[in-house]
Image (cartoon, helix red, strand yellow):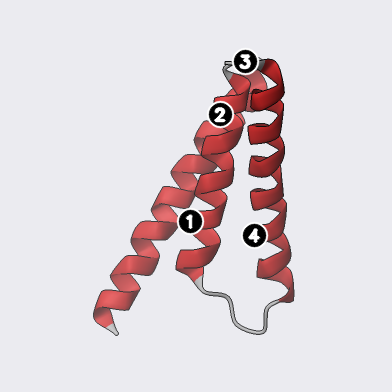
Amino acid sequence: MNPVLADIIGLLGSACIVGAYAYNNMAARVDALVYNVVNLLGAVMLCISLTVHYNLASLILEFVWSGLALLGIAKALKARRRA
């Protein structure tokens, strides 16, 4: 992959994670599904970027972040089914 494209993907992923964090802190009511999907998208994009600009610690962090987002998505979908 082109290093510039990897940078753009990584920057977009970072923007997703920061945007989700801001949404979580500023919204009157947070939609857990939206919050976790945006976090997952950001983490996946950062993982893609890290295949070009490799950093083991960051890659592990993004895998953990993705796992937590997947758990949050499952929990949000379960709650929606109950409602």
Cα separation between marks 1 and 4 = 9 Å
Image depth: mark 4 or mark 3 in front: 3
Disc 2: CA contacts within 10 A as few (<14), some (14-19) or many (>=20)? many
The residue shown at (63%, 34%) is 9
Image depth: mark 3 or mark 1 in front: 3
Amino acid on which the number 2 mark rests in the picture:
Cys
Residue indicated by mark 3: 52
Q: Secondary structure at mark 2?
A: helix
In-image side of 55 versus 45 (left or right): right
Residue indicated by mark 2: 47
Cα separation between marks 1 and 2 = 15 Å
Disc 3: CA contacts within 10 A as few (<14), some (14-19) or many (>=20)? some
| Residue in front for this viewpoint, 80 or 5 | 5
User: Of the residues under marks 2 and 3, which one precedes in the sequence?
Assistant: 2
- Estimate the x, y position of residue 35 in percent, counting from the top left: 55, 63
- Estimate the x, y position of residue 46 in percent, counting from the top left: 61, 33
User: Of the residues under marks 1 and 2, which one precedes in the sequence?
Assistant: 1
Disc 1: CA contacts within 10 A as few (<14), some (14-19) or many (>=20)? some
Decide: is 39 above or below 45: below
Q: Secondary structure at mark 3?
A: loop
Q: Quadrant of the N terminus?
A: top right
Cα separation between marks 3 and 1 = 24 Å
User: Of the residues under marks 3 and 1, which one precedes in the sequence?
Assistant: 1
